Image (cartoon, helix red, strand yellow):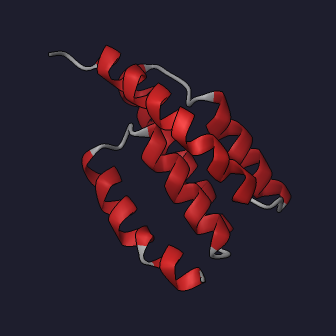
């Protein structure tokens, strides 16, 4: 079962190379890393997003990402955060389109 999650890590990482402010992809990558026991990497992904958002957009990450980071730091199960992914994807996409020039 973990193997199917492991396969997502390179893909999601690649997406973030091109879209470093993509909070939905960050959220999913953090979950996948958490599910595969790579909690430290998951926190680093969050930290990279925080640094990028602060440096380029003077923004903080969405509250759900902060909650996910806190859960990972506590060692909580991240599976519950998968149910939050669909609404967050829509919110992050709307937020992203509002801050990108057309």
Please state if 89 lies on the left or on the right of 31 as rendered: left
Q: Is residue 39 above or below residue 90?
A: below
Residue 14 is situated, as x and y percent measured from the top left of the image, at 30, 61
Residue drawn at point x = 66 percent, y = 35 percent: 64
Q: Can residue 33 be seen in the rendering of this structure? A: yes
Please state if 91 lies on the left or on the right of 64 as rendered: left
Q: Quadrant of residue 10?
A: bottom left
The quadrant of the image that shows the C terminus is top left
Residue drawn at point x = 62 percent, y = 75 percent: 36
Q: Please tell me which residue lies in front, 95 or 85.
A: 85
Q: Is residue 57 above or below residue 50?
A: above
Q: Outermost residue toward the left?
A: 102
Residue 16 is situated, as x and y percent measured from the top left of the image, at 35, 51
Q: Is residue 38 above or below residue 22?
A: below
Residue 1 is situated, as x and y percent measured from the top left of the image, at 60, 83
Q: Is residue 79 above or below residue 93?
A: below
Q: Can residue 50 be seen in the rendering of this structure? A: no
Residue drawn at point x = 83 percent, y = 62 percent: 75
Q: Please tell me which residue lies in front, 53 or 30.
A: 30
Residue 82 is situated, as x and y percent measured from the top left of the image, at 63, 52
The number of discs equals 0
Residue drawn at point x = 59 percent, y = 81 percent: 2
Please state if 82 lies on the left or on the right of 15 as rendered: right
């Amino acid at each position: 079962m973990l193997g199917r999650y492991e396969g997502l890590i390179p893909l999601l990482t690649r997406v973030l190379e091109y879209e470093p402010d993509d909070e939905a992809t960050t959220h999913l990558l953090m979950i996948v890393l958490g599910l595969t026991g790579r909690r430290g990497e998951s926190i680093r992904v969050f930290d990279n997003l925080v640094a990028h958002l602060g440096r380029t957009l003077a923004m903080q990450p969405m509250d759900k990402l902060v909650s996910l980071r806190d859960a990972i730091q506590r060692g909580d199960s991240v599976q519950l955060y998968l149910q939050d992914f669909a609404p967050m994807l829509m919110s992050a996409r709307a937020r992203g389109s509002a801050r990108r020039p057309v």
